[in-house]
Image (spheres, rainbow, N blue to C red):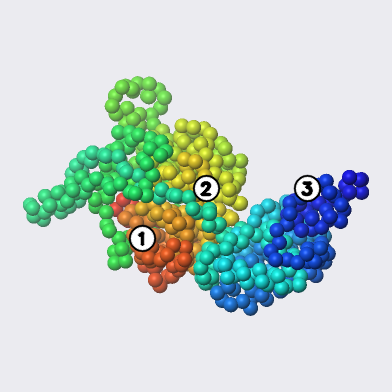
Amino acid sequence: MGEKSAPLLAVLQLLRKYNLKGTEEILRKEASLGDVEFESLDLPEVELASILTTHHTESDPYTYELAYDSLKKFVENSLDMYKYELSTLLYPVFVHMYLILILYDHNEHAYKFFERFAADQEDYYQEDLKRLSLVKNKDQIKGNELAEIYSSNKFEVQLSRDASSQLKRFLHEQKNSSVVINIINNHIQIEVHDGPGRTQSQVRAVAGGILGEAARNENRAKVFYGLLKEPDIQVLPAPVEDEDDIEETPDKPKKKKAKKDNIFMKKPKSDPNAPPNDRIPLPELKENDKIEKGKAIREAAKRVQLGPETLPSICFYTLLNSGNTALCADICDDSTLLAVGFNNSNIKVWTLTTARLRGMKSADKLQEIDRDAGDVLVRMMEEKDRDTSRTLFGHSGPVYKVGFDPFKTMLLSCSEDDTIRLWSLQCWTCLVVYRGHVWPVWDVRWSPHGYYFVSSSHDRTARLWATDHHEPLRVFAGHLSDVDCVQFHPNSNYIATGSSDRTVRVWDCLTGVQVRIMTGHKSTIYTLAFSVCGRWLASGGGGGEVLVFDLSSGAPAAAAPPCHSAPVHALAFSRDGTILSSGSLDCNIKLWDFTAITEEATGEEPGVNTSTLKEDKFLLRSFSTKNSPIKSLHFTRRNLLLAVGTYEGSS
């Protein structure tokens, strides 16, 4: 190959990088580069004459504007049974036309093209387009996060078979369709499904992801969403001070006691959708943990059954004089401790009962303790050093999330300093600093069975850890942007992640493989919550929306138009799974009839329809605070709803 071909090869490499195969093939033929192999372009139903003029039409900047305008009019004039699915093509075609115009140095035409058609795109893509508009020349494509995502990934579009035929017919008959065909072949993955075209609400329910909808084969893996069989725990009779039954007649206490004994004696039924108990190794319960489990079972016997007629009472904890400094909050499982993380890198733990927090004895006094004593932990605590709160120091940046372990012995925290810290709630000191993420860590969550925990970060990954390992056991990579929130499944076999790429993904802790990808959010996802039964996953987004997904199919079971006027940062299910509560920065708490939502979802054919989370249909009640955005929601074992917020003063 001669020296004259070297510049052309450089151009070809650049074109190949951005998958412009049609132009690449023409240039190869014209330059007679017979010894260079390129992939063939698979064009549907296009005449040879149009292929031979591909490079001429693509180098003409006016062609793009005409081609896009024709495509847009074709979609708008289509029948409703095709229109809404075909409309999902407009955004990716628009984006790639803009990038190709920039790549060909038609910058002025690119700006005019952008100004003419950008406002026509869906409202949930407008923020992305603002970021994409920062690309003013081809040298800036590589440094732009969105431009790189679109250049190296295919946008997923699902069409009915009839809609696909309509599109092919249009492209075959249209004069300047080669540029659209090239973009579809190289940058869009069209998946054809049988059956009628979807309605506008059905299309909108799953739209919004940076790369469009989830491919159907992404959600075919089996997910064991059932609950593990709990170990047999001998429940001791409740102490006298725990009994709050009023003895009106001698017979009454006996009947109630017999009822409680029956509850304790019931053996849990095996769940056909549950994973084997030994699928992942879980820690054995210690004696103190068994005692705590026994207390939880006794309290569950006194639980109030919630529903539309019996809504929970709400106890709201307001953090005064904190303003915007308190970033996160968590309440432990037995509802006796509250932890709050601040932007000055401190963590504060309060007791929510009359029992005060005890400190540990000095080193000299600890030497005098009999280590073989059965109550050695009690003896280690200082009798006089008691207070209503404790402050933990160690992080060097804002603390974004705190979380109590299931047995109230340890606390996890994550920070902008890229670290996760494990704190002892007995000696009130940091035990371990976990380093693995290279960017700020946004969220950290315990496994419901303890021992394991999971974190998510700005580095686009989530990581699975164990308390006795300083390195992560699994790294879950696949999101296209920040992983903003994470949550463990009740059976500890799966984790869910929510991201700024507007997708929710579910990962298998055993294999590290992604088993579900779910779309429908139109903004960043800030919080996740699994239902008590493990089948449903609720998510809250930055646009104030709440979505519910069915893990068995990966399809949205219920989609909400923005029911809050600000980002949703807290979700919690009641202990019996009948009520879903959502808390937002708009200072509102909303209670949803989750039983009705799931009944309507299970009555429909999976993936065909989606319930709308209408306020007049499923909303049971809304509660407003004076001016305190909601940071955390927590149901006690008896189904009292606890909420935490920061008072921000009068506006």
Residue 248 placement, left or right of 128:
left
Distance of label 2 from label 3 (alpha carbons): 35 Å
Q: Which residue is mark 1?
A: 579
| SS for dot 1 | strand
Residue 21 visible to the viewer: yes
Under mark 1, the amino acid is Ile
Q: Position of residue 110 (x, y in %)?
A: 77, 65
Pointer 2 with pointer 1, Cβ within 8 A: no
Q: Nearer the viewer, mark 2 or mark 1?
A: 2
Q: Nearer the viewer, mark 3 or mark 1?
A: 3
Q: Position of residue 531 (x, y in %)?
A: 39, 54
Q: Position of residue 501 (x, y in %)?
A: 59, 55
Residue 53 falls in image quadrant = bottom right
Q: Nearer the viewer, mark 2 or mark 3?
A: 3
Residue 65 falls in image quadrant = bottom right
Rendered-image quadrant of the N terminus: top right
**Which residue is at a point 61% across and 68% down the rendered structure image?**
164
Under mark 2, the amino acid is Gln
Of the pair 253 and 164, the residue shown nearer to us: 164
Q: Which residue is mark 2?
A: 514
Looking at the rendered structure, the number of numbered marks drawn on it comes to: 3
Distance of label 3 from label 1 (alpha carbons): 61 Å
**Which residue is at a point 35% across and 29% down the rendered structure image?**
380
Would you place residue 218 above or below residue 623 in this image? above
Which comes sooner in the sequence, label 2 or label 1? 2
Under mark 3, the amino acid is Glu
Q: Which residue is mark 3?
A: 37
